[in-house]
Image (cartoon, helix red, strand yellow):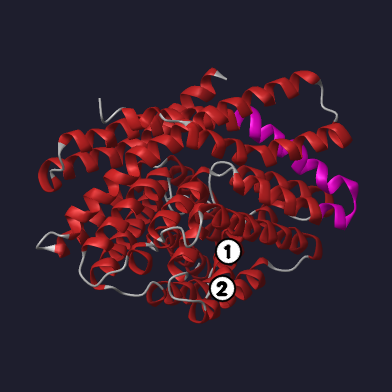
Amino acid sequence: MNTILPFLDFSHVFMEVLLALAPLAAFFLFFQLLYLKLPQEFVVNMVKGVFLCACGLILFLQGVQVGFMPVGTAMGEVLGAMNKPWLLIPIGFFLGLVATIAEPAVHILSYEVEKASSGSIREKTILATLSLGVALFVALGMAKIIYGVPIHHILVPGYLLALLMMRFCEATFVAIAFDAGGVATGPMTVTFVLAVALGMASAIDGRDPILDGFGLIALVAMAPILSVMALGMIVTYAKKRS
Amino acid sequence: MKSDLKENLKEVVLAVLPITLVVILLQVFLVSLPWAEFSRFLIGAAMVLLGLLLFLQGVKIGLLPMGEAVGSELPKHGSMFFLLFFAFVLGFAVTVAEPDVRVLAHQVDKVSDGLVGSNLLILTVAAGVAFFVTMAMLRIVLRVPIAWLYGASYLIIIVLSYIAPASFVPIAFDSGGVTTGPVTVPFILALGLGTVAVMGGRSSFADGFGLVGLASVGPVIGVMILGLIYG
């Protein structure tokens, strides 16, 4: 019973969800009254949609705050206190791989890139590149926490590399690549994986959760950018040669 | 609508289940938390799954048509000020509703012991997105190549990451990653494509892309500036 009780106290998230959706609803209402004047049936549908969003958001935030955050942090603390912390690097790799291969947004992106390459790169190749890219960066993120590497020592070279690769890549690929940043930062990464990272950082000696725990999401967002640009460079190079 | 539900269900299950399974494996073989505690994770996973499903369904029948209606209305007035001002307001309102942004803000609030409160972070992130959505619109109208905008913003980020207080830098970078969620992305695309269609007559393909990436640059810069003010 004790595990279920905290889930039933919704008062906190209730207010929050109201605050989250109110600006958008007010903004739409303003436009509807002044400019849009859409027929009533549209508006009724939208109200239904907003209501569904509110219910969904309440459940989601409650599940994250009461379920994911405490358990994620506790797991991270156990993992960080292990006597073989380097084991976390392959675990991170595996976690990144599994999360990306299944993610629907990644499949859409793979299809987009195949189209942009006029079919010269197969969807499967793109999917594999993306998943390996994300896996590698999650592993890097684990190593960053274990050894206390400041985040900009990884991200700044990454950004510079992206700027450099941009010059050798067709414009279409550049645009797709930068948009691709969000594909792998799915709901589980931000909620659970981040909580684990924060737990790890507070358990490992000499690490600080604020300095070392955050940064993983940024790494996961950078991986697809570099992966897509690398593929873009290959396509651009192949076109020039033929 | 039924096919939407099926599609959304597939999407949510594929996003939640794989990591849940890995976490269960970790629990069984490596971590062994007390099962009473671990069961909270399972209940949480079920709630997140159901919550996301309802939320995505609501986005499709409510928020998305709203965003498309407003997004395609904005450029029609032919007034640059009108477009830019409301692009800003829209960018702000959309980010405030983004679930991932809220979750990150909660984590930051908790870890920093309330030093950076969750509302302050959400407002900063939303202002960052709003500003960069506005810039992106301006870019389409003025026909500035997108590469320039990326180059300039990345350089600003790199410089700021050395000046801003160290404790804000990782949070700032993570803020950029959470803004590209199920609410923001369709809104920004609708707004961008609408603007391109009305203002341009140029290839909407290359112009419409790249907007989402720009929107995720804004919060990084915003949170670093917040750090400079605080520090």
Quarter-of-image position of residue A166:
bottom right
Residue A241 at x, y = what percent? 49, 70
Q: Is residue B212 above or below residue A208?
A: above
Q: In the image, is B46 to the left or to the right of A105?
A: left
Q: Work out whether B95 lies above or below B21.
A: below
Residue A100: image location, x then y, percent: 36, 48
- Could you say where residue A171 lies in the image, as x and y percent from the top left? 61, 64
Q: Are marks 2 and 1 on the same chain?
A: yes
State the SS at label 2.
helix
Q: Main secondary structure of the magenta part?
A: helix
Instruction: Work out whether residue B46 or residue B190 is closer to the camera in this orientation and state it.
Output: B46
Q: What residue type is labelled 1?
A: Val
Residues in magenta?
B60-83
Q: In the image, what residue occupies the spot 24% across and 38% down?
A: B21
Q: Say whether residue A203 is left or right of residue A82.
A: right
Please name the residue that numbered disc 1 is placed on.
B217
Residue at left offset 30%, top offset 57% = A197
Residue B4 among magenta residues: no
Residue at the spot x=34%, y=62% of the render? Answer: A213
Whether residue A98 appears in this view of the structure is no
Q: Which residue is identified by label 2? A: B154
For the residue carrying disc 1, how many other residues have a C-alpha within 10 Å: few (<14), some (14-19), or many (20+)?
many
Q: How far apart are marks 2 and 1 (CA)?
A: 8 Å
